[in-house]
Amino acid sequence: MRKIKEKPQPQSTQTLHGQPSAGGSSCAGALRPAVAAAVLAAALGCLVAGYVAGRAQWSLKKPPLTPELLATTADRAVPLKPGPWGHLEAVPIRIAPLEEYLPVKMLEEIGSRWYFVDYSPETLTALFNKADLTPAQRAELADTAKWQQGGDGITITPSDNLIFTLSPSARKTIYTALWQLPASGLRGRMASFRADQFDDIFAHSGLSADIIDLVKTLSFRHGQLLFFCDAPWVLGKIPVFDDKVRFIRTIVGKSTLLLRLHVTADSNVTSLANYWSKASWGKDITPMLESLSRVPGGARVDIVHLFPPMPTECLYTFPFPSRDPADALKDCHWVALNFFRDPPDLSLTDHEKIRKIIDNDYFPVLSDPRYGDLVQLVRPNGDVIHSAIFIADDVVYTKNSSGSLEPYMLMRLQTLIDTFDAFVPEDETLRVVISRSKYY
């Protein structure tokens, strides 16, 4: 191996005490003060530049959020279409129940079982034949040795690989059939999200990118919504309990709206009061609107302050879990028909009584809907599958089931339709039927 020669080192031109040696150049000593001055100037320049840059960076930082600044900070409010309801603006928000009310362990114990109630082997085979399955998936689901057949239906426990590899089309075919069967239990573990809000919802979840991607992979689209029904399976892939809680709290959360009425000096207070005053609950609305109209530049009021007592108390809340069987009957129809009642009529859990009340005390709305109108989603055979209350523009007041994980909330009508359209066969289209009370 060739040895690398070291480069000769130059002789030192400076002694230990800084004097030039006999062999050194006398020019070095002459240049030394100039070099020192240059170094000092450069150092001072760096200090000055650093100070200036620091001051500039400090000046670019956001000022502290003082109460005065907060009062003028814009939020994400979007205006609704103008109408007799006045100038309304909506702020999208998302609400979720507290950790202590989340069914984490219960969902883990349920597991990924498919319970096809009232299905025969022939009808179940026909369903799987309709689904977009791979040969391997079709072979697994056709293996009747893995079916648990009882007197009221068939239960299948799909493999992890099958759940993960189902196409969105096949997933939609199978899960749509399941959630049309209330006894299947799928509705209790179904979550939905606006497709255009999915990334924003999960960006604030605290979940890892892998889990978020997994939820998206296991979801399928229906209308504007993404539906997700495999929470028990995903829970098994999350090792840390706190992450399980974050996951469940994210998927059971609901997107809703804060609604504000903007009243100015140009507002027609009489017309506004006429719109928002229903069922003898308007005596305090006119004075409030008049006072707002006198504020320079106008003022905003949350729409909840214009509601009757029950919706005012319940809006954005989740009911407590209850052992009382009667509470399980307080569904969307009970909530809608009690909107203006104080106290609420507890007997309105009887659907036959509800039908008679609507037939006798309501008439169909052939004009534009107004605040307080009853909005119902109806199947072609006449079955009413949901009731809500019209508020303004395309916003309704709703509670989408009697369960404790379903809040009282405001919702866009089209999103509500998409949610319940998933509960009917694909060859059916829900009709929106609007009725108005004869008495308010």
Image (cartoon, rainbow, N blue to C red):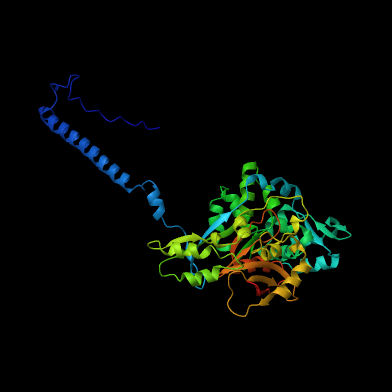
Q: Residue at 20% across / 24% down in the picture?
A: 12
Q: Toward which corner of the image does residue 290 lie, by quadrant?
A: bottom left
Screen quadrant of the N terminus: top left
Rendered location of residue 430, percent (x, y): 68, 73
Q: Toward which corner of the image does residue 31 lie, by quadrant?
A: top left
- Asked if 269 appears above or below 408 in the picture, the reply is below
Rendered location of residue 267, percent (x, y): 44, 70
- Asked if 319 appears above or below 266 in the picture, the reply is above
Front residue of this view, candidates 137 and 171? 171
Front residue of this view, candidates 390 and 413? 390
Screen quadrant of the C terminus: bottom right
Q: Toward which corner of the image does residue 179 lie, by quadrant?
A: bottom right
Front residue of this view, candidates 80 and 7? 80
Rendered location of residue 182, percent (x, y): 77, 61
Q: Residue at 70% across / 56% down in the picture?
A: 403
User: Can residue 424 be seen from the camera position used here?
Assistant: no
